[in-house]
Structure formats: C-alpha cells, structure tokens
C-alpha cells in the first residue's frame, strides 16, 4: 500500500493549512484511494460547485456506497484550482448535520415561539399559496417582499417578479458590497466583480484596507495572496488589528478605526504634489484632475497623522512606495465595505488612487472582465408592478439588489403602502441586518413569513411556514457564469439524492408558481431540462460539462489595456471620474471630503468584527465539522487594557453597548494584536435557535450589539462599526 505524500505538495499544503486552505493530499483520502485501488470499495466522482460561501468554487464529490466521503477542489475551476478552503471541505458537515430541516413545518404557536408541526409538501405549499393570494387581493402584489442571498435567488426572485412585486432585498448590497460597487461604478463606470478582478499575482505592491485575507477565505483570492507573498510582493496592510494578512506585510499600519479616508486623501495629495502619478494614463483616461488637486491640498501628511495615529514618515514613505511601483500596485477595494456610513466616498478614494497609479486595467493592478457573454434566452416578460418600489429607499444610487433595511422600514411604517409578506430564502436577516429590534418589529406586522432554508437558523425559526430546501450537494441550480479573465460556465448537479423530505429550490419555486397560477414562468419539466436547453443555445457541450464541472470558453480573455484593447469607461463622461458630476448633481461631494467620526469615550471600545477562516457568517456555526474547529468566538482585547481591567486570557465576559444591549457570554482573547481603542470578534455566533444543538448560545452575536448604524446617503449601505461596548465580568464565570 502507498501512503506517501509528495514532499512538494505536502509542504505546499501544510503552509496553506494555517490560512485555512486544505489541499487534496490528506490521509483519509489516501486511504480511500488505496482501498479503491485494491478493489475493496467503489467510488463515484461527481462535479458540482460549493455554496458554503459565494465564491462558487468548483468541487468534486467522492461518493462511496451512497455516502459523500470527501469534497475536493476541481482543478479546472478558476476559483478553486484544485483546492477547497476548510469551509468548502466541510460541506459534508452541512449535508449530514443532524439538525437539518427535514420536512415542511407549519407554525402552531405565536410567531417566534418555535412551535411547529410537520406538514406534507402539498399542505405547506398550499398554505403559502393561499396566504400569498390573500395578500395580493387585499393589498396588491407589491405588499410581498423577498429577501434572498446565494443561488436560491435564481429560483425565487423570478417567482416574486411573476407575482408582481419589485421589492427585493439582498444583504449582499446594503450590508456588504454596495458602497464598493457604487463607488467604483461612479469612478470607472463598472464594479470590480465577484470574484474581484485583482491581478495580485503580478503586483509589486498590494494595499489592504481591512480586507483580512487569510481570515476572509475567498479561495483563489487567498491563493493569489499566498503566491504574491511568496514572490516577494510588498503588502501594506492597514488594520487596527494585526490580522493574518498583517503578519505577511511589509508594512502594517495600525490605523485608528474610522479614519482610513484621511490616509487615502493624504496619499492622493502626496502622489499629486510629488508628481508620482501616471501622467499619461490620467491625461488619456481621466477627468477632473484640477478639481481633485485643489480639493486634496488641505490633506497634508501632518494632518492625516493626527487623524490616523500613523507617523508622518510612514504616510509619506508608503505613498512613495505606491508611486514608484505604479502601475503594478493593487489597491484592494474591499468587499464588506459598510463600515462608517461614508463608505461610497472611501471607495471613491481607492478608485482615485487606482486611477492616479494607472493600475485599473493594468498588469499587477486590476484586470478587465471578458467582453464575451452567452446569449440571453427569450423568457416570458414579468408584469409591470403598479406601485413604485420601496426597496430602494431614498438612495439615488441603490441598485437591483435593493436595500434590505428600506423594506424593513416600510414594513414597520406601512407607508407609502403596507408590506405584509416576507419571503426569505438563504439569508439569516436577524444576523445580517443591524438593529434586531427593528427586524423583530417589522416581522410582527406581517401576515406571512415564509422561509426556504436548509437549517433552522434564527430567522427561519420566526417563520409561519418553513420549506426545507435540500443542500447544494443534492440539487441542480442555475448554471454559474463566470466573467473573470475568461468566460466560464459551471454546473451544479446533485451528488446524491435529497435526504429526508427536503427538495431543491427550483422544485419549490415551480410548485408554488403552479399553485399561484404562474406556472407558465417555469416552462420546463425538470431543471436539468432547462439547463440542457441553455447549454445547447450557448454552444456548450452539456455531457462534457457534467463530466468536467467547468468549461472555460477559449479565446475570451482581453485582460489588460493595450493600443488594440482600449478601456471603455461607462461613466457619464466616458472617462474615469476623479471629479463626479453625477454625485454633484445629486447633492453629494464630487471629490471625496473627510468626515470625522465619533471615537469611544473612556472605558468604551469600538466594536469591530470580521471572519474566521473556518466559518461563513452564521451559516456554518452548527456544522459539526467546522464547529469542532472553532466552536465559539472570542473578543480580542489589548493586553495592556486587559491588565488594567483585571481580565485574564480565557475569562468569560459580557459586552454591553452604548444603548444597553448586552451580549451572550464570550471568552476574552488577550492579545497585543489589537489597538487599545477597539475590541474585535468574529461575526455570526451566539445563535438563539434551540434547534441548533452545536451552536445554540455559543459565543456572542456582534449583530445584537449593533443597535446603531450609519446609513450611507448615497447607496443605503449600513455602516456597522459605529457601536461602542464595555466589558463586564460574566457573573457565572466558568
Ligand atoms: N472565512 C470566511 N471568508 C469570507 C466570508 C466568511 O463568512 N468567512 N465572507 C465573505 C464575504 S461575503 C465578505 S463581504 C468578505 C468580508 O471580508 P473583508 O472584505 O475582508 O471585510 P473587512 O471588513 O474589510 O475586514 C475585516 C477587517 O477589517 C478590520 N477593520 C475594522 N475596522 C477597521 C477600520 O476602521 N479600518 C481598517 N483599515 N480596518 C478595519 C478588522 O480588524 C478586520 O481585520 O469575506 C468573504 N470571505
Ligand atoms: N454584524 C454583522 N453583520 C453582517 C456582517 C458582519 O460581518 N457583521 N456581514 C455582512 C455580509 S458581508 C454579508 S454578505 C451578509 C450575509 O448575510 P446572510 O447571507 O444572511 O448570512 P448567513 O448568516 O450565512 O445566513 C444564511 C442563511 O442561509 C441559509 N442557507 C445556507 N445554505 C442554503 C441553501 O443552500 N439554501 C437555502 N435556501 N438556504 C441556505 C443558512 O442556513 C442561513 O439561514 O451579512 C452581513 N451582515
Ligand atoms: S471559498 Fe471555500 S466556502 Fe467559499 S465557495 Fe470556495 S470552497 Fe466553498
Ligand atoms: Mo459579504
């Protein structure tokens, strides 16, 4: 028998393990391979893609005797490159989680009481359809809103559109990427995409504001990060916390939280005043250099140093490092960017830096998306809603993903018209949107709350009817079209049949549509038929796709600006907007201007949060495999502060915020790796759902302490790092 690792691949694996990436050569698999070679077992391999987060990594499932034994990264998938992150490997933990939703459930108690009875699909779907019909008759279709995240969106958003409501809210906008996407769109006419089109592997310098890569575990991005570090690229990491990425950095700038724009504006000023910008690029492609130069004059390194706590010499040195290495400088524009309420303007600063360095569309900076696309098929048009949408609030630059909390506000106030039904699929609103009290108040006003989910998380346990979706390993979903360097298409197909009575999202949507008289919007028998038809019209060989999982369409990459491949900026002026007329017209600063934010009072700490490499938000906290790796979160507290306050590493405390909200108990992690003015915790813990046997009341919920949020008036993003907490000894310290 052979258990030998190749030494090279082992070294590569063990290095990445600490960052959360697990490669394919782990022992149990070797054992399985050996047993397979001996003819002792017969394994079946099926391709699919992951849904533990939204990077959609291509995966290969190994099934022995009807049981999924292992998930591997698909070597031909650009997001996976043969590897899955620890969370992706833990997908089997979701599949076999004993606490999964197993049958449809109908509430028998008051909303939120957690009392349910089992129901058949026919009954549960019938109840939902009847209530949706009643709401439509009484209030109109616009009175139902959908909240959704991930692939369920592809099935349920069309259902809502067919029903006649425009009110959609995805936390991926107003609680996540919204400000970044809008900031870049206003500057370059397009966003950076997901996966972000960063050419980090060719960068000489990479700048990370927050962006805690290595904890933020988006697979290929972390692989690029590791490769860039290995190649000697210089990382400038700006973070009040010594993150995993800071540990690999050339320069770590432990910035005072909420002051990043001061550093960026000073950098812009230095690049301009020292002539360290790409004059040719700016002259050819950008508008508004004069206005920008005048506006940033006041932002001197000395001023920025006072704001940020970063020494003047470091501000100047880092600016010069950027200028001298341009254009091979990657300014990561971030992903979770809803921080302080001026987040579009912070992203505008990053965009302006990219423009001055000439790094947008250039090697080592960002690359351009493929211009190729698949033809759009003909589909039955949706009815025009009769009432104006409520999901954009009063935010002029909010987009198609909607503003979750605008729907919540309208649900509470019932103005300009009432919202009476929430359809929730693949999102845990109580954990995702700040101020849980408001969410609960809105839920109280509803006639119907339906949840389509795999697990009984907090928001699901508020629903009147719970529809159990099978996990991503048991279903077809929409083809994933990737528009990175090249055009790609990936298939999700069932690896095993659905367990229990769970059903795929496409089936649930189609059955509901049928009962609502909207069956013609789902004009196929099975989802596989739909996908096959799409492949045929796209010229993609479906049988081949089934086998390999991902197909990259050849000759579709045009990543960098060249004389024959000029950039196209879809802004109002057709150029990069250093000065934004669009913003000016709507009454906002056309060039970013610094705003000061409140800092903590004595005895208080700013609450900041982020990711664990082995968890995704709340959704993995009960996953037996991942729970074992990191069962509860900790609150990071600076060593000196801990000493002054008498806290030891591992003590349990509770956190109380400025509005009196108190957290569940949480362990203190005493560390030099954080500034003295803030505390940090991993998001997603402290669930209140008793059905989750591993996760129930483990760790503390950051969202419970985020009672206050700073809304970005440009796009509606909810800045969530504006709360302050005090630490109190837990009474029953274990
Ligand atoms: N493992 C794992 N990876 C994930 C996810 C997951 O759930 N789990 N989720 C994915 C998703 S959807 C997203 S949006 C991303 C989110 O991940 P990121 O986009 O990286 O989120 P950030 O908020 O930038 O990063 C948090 C870091 O910001 C620092 N920080 C806090 N306040 C400030 C400040 O004022 N200034 C600066 N400069 N830094 C500050 C914190 O100390 C922390 O290190 O992660 C993605 N990757
Ligand atoms: N305080 C605070 N708030 C945040 C963040 C933070 O760091 N701190 N992060 C923000 C960010 S960046 C984001 S992107 C959002 C994320 O917000 P959400 O996407 O709402 O995050 P989750 O907590 O993972 O909730 C996911 C829900 O989807 C369910 N689910 C998982 N897989 C499936 C599936 O295949 N089908 C169906 N139907 N359901 C499924 C899970 O069981 C769970 O109930 O939260 C935002 N809100
Ligand atoms: S990054 Fe990890 S969790 Fe996210 S899709 Fe890829 S393997 Fe899955
Ligand atoms: Mo996100």
Image (spheres, rainbow, N blue to C red):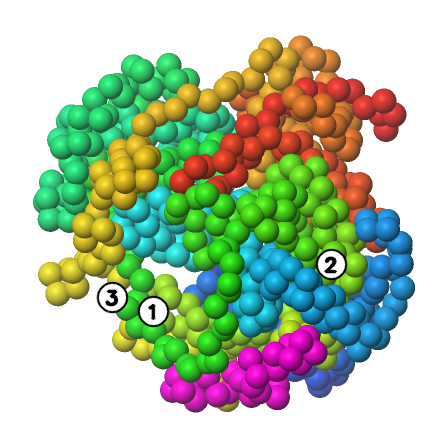
Observer-side mark, 2 or 1, equals 2
Q: Which residue is mark 3?
A: 558
Q: Nearer the viewer, residue 164 or 395?
A: 164
Residue 86 vertical position relative to residue 648 in the rendered view, above or below: below
Q: Is residue 15 magenta?
A: no
Q: Is residue 11 left or right of residue 441?
A: left
| Label number found at residue 448 | 2
User: Residue, x 61% and y 63% (percent of image)?
Assistant: 140
Mark 1 neighbour class, 10 Å CA radius: few under 14, some 14 to 19, many 20 or more: many
Q: Which residue is mark 1?
A: 486
Taking 234 as reference, is 486 above or below it? below
* Residue 639 occupies quadrant: top right
- CA gap, disc 2 and disc 1: 43 Å
Where is residue 415 shown, x and y percent of the image? 59, 46
> Crowdedness of circle 2 by 10 Å Cα count: few (<14), some, many (20+)?
many
Q: Which residues are magenta?
A: 512-540
Asked if the residue at label 1 sits under 8 Å from ligand 3, the reply is no
Residue 530 part of the magenta segment: yes
Q: Nearer the viewer, mark 3 or mark 2?
A: 2
Q: Secondary structure at mark 3?
A: loop
State whether the magenta stretch is mostly helix, strand or loop: helix
Instruction: From the viewer's perspective, tell me whether residue 500 is left or right of residue 649.
Output: right
Q: Which badge, 2 or 1, comes first in the chain's sequence?
A: 2
Q: Is residue 31 above or below residue 430?
A: below
Q: CA distance from mark 3 to mark 2?
A: 48 Å
Q: Earlier in the sequence, mark 3 or mark 2?
A: 2
- The quadrant of the picture occupied by the C terminus is top right
Q: Residues within 10 Å of mark 3 (few under 14, many from 20)?
A: some
Q: Residue at x 72, y 52 (%)?
A: 446
Q: Position of residue 11 (x, y in %)?
A: 52, 54
Camera-side residue: 412 or 474?
412
Q: Nearer the viewer, residue 332 or 716?
A: 716
């Amino acid at each position: 028998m052979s258990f030998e690792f190749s030494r090279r691949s082992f070294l590569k694996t063990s290095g990445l393990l600490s960052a959360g990436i697990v490669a394919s050569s782990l022992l149990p698999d070797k054992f399985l391979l050996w047993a397979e070679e001996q003819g002792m077992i017969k394994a079946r391999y099926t391709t699919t893609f992951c849904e533990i987060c939204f990077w959609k990594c291509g995966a290969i499932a190994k099934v022995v005797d009807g049981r999924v034994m292992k998930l591997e990264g698909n070597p031909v998938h650009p997001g996976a490159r043969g590897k899955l992150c620890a969370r992706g490997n833990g997908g089997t933990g979701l599949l076999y989680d004993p606490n999964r939703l197993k049958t449809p459930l109908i509430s028998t108690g008051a909303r939120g009481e957690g009392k349910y009875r089992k129901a058949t699909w026919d009954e549960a779907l019938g109840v939902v359809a009847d209530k949706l019909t009643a709401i439509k008759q009484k209030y109109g279709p616009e009175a139902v809103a959908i909240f959704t995240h991930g692939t369920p969106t592809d099935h349920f958003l069309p259902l809502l559109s067919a029903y006649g409501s425009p009110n959609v809210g995805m936390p991926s906008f107003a609680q996540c990427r919204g400000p970044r996407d809008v900031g870049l769109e206003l500057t370059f006419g397009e966003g950076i995409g997901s996966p972000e089109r960063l050419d980090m592997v060719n960068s000489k310098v990479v700048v990370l504001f927050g962006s805690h890569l290595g904890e933020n575990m988006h697979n290929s991005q972390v692989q690029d990060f590791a490769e860039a570090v290995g190649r000697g690229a210089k990382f400038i990491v700006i973070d009040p916390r010594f993150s995993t990425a800071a540990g690999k950095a050339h320069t770590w700038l432990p910035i005072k939280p909420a002051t990043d724009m001061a550093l960026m504006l000073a950098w812009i000023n230095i690049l301009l005043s020292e002539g360290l910008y790409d004059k040719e690029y700016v002259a050819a492609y950008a508008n508004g250099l004069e206005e920008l130069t005048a506006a940033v004059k006041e932002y001197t390194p000395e001023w920025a140093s006072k704001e940020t706590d970063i020494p003047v010499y470091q501000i100047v040195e880092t600016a010069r490092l950027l200028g001298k290495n341009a254009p091979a400088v990657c300014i990561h524009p971030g992903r979770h960017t809803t921080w302080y309420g001026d987040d579009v303007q912070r992203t505008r600063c990053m965009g302006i830096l990219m423009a001055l360095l000439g790094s947008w569309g250039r090697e080592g900076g960002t690359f351009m998306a493929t211009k190729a696309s698949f033809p759009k098929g003909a589909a039955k048009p949706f009815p025009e809603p009769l009432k104006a949408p409520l999901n954009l609030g009063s935010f002029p630059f909010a987009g198609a993903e909607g503003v979750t909390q605008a729907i919540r506000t309208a649900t509470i106030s019932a103005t300009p018209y009432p919202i009476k039904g929430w359809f929730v699929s693949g999102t845990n609103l109580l954990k995702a949107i700040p101020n849980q009290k408001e969410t609960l108040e809105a839920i109280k006003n509803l006639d119907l709350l339906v949840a389509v989910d795999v697990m009984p998380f907090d928001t699901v346990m508020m629903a009147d009817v719970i529809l159990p979706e099978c996990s991503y390993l048991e279903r077809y979903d929409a083809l994933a079209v990737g528009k990175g360097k090249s055009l790609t298409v990936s298939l999700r197909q069932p690896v095993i049949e659905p367990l229990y009575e769970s059903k795929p999202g496409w089936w649930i949507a189609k059955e509901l549509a049928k009962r609502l008289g909207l069956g013609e919007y789902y004009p196929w028998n099975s989802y596989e038929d739909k996908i096959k038809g799409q492949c045929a019209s796209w010229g993609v060989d479906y049988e081949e796709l089934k086998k390999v999982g991902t197909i990259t369409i050849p000759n579709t990459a045009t990543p960098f600006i060249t004389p024959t491949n000029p950039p196209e900026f879809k802004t109002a002026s057709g150029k990069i907007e250093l000065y934004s007329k669009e913003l000016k017209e709507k009454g906002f600063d056309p060039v970013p201007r610094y705003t000061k934010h409140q800092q903590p009072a004595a005895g208080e700490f700013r609450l900041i949060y982020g990711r664990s490499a082995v968890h995704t938000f709340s959704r993995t906290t009960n996953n037996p495999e991942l729970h074992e790796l990191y069962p509860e979160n900790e609150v990071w507290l600076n060593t000196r502060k801990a000493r002054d306050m008498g806290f030891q590493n591992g003590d349990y405390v509770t956190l109380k915020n400025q509005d009196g909200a108190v957290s569940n108990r949480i362990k203190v992690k005493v560390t030099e790796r954080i500034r003295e003015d803030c505390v940090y915790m991993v998001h997603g813990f402290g669930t209140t759902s008793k059905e989750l046997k591993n996760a129930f009341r483990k760790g503390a919920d950051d969202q419970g302490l985020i009672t206050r949020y700073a809304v970005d008036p440009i796009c509606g993003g909810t800045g969530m790092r504006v709360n302050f907490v005090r630490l109190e000894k837990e009474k029953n310290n274990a």
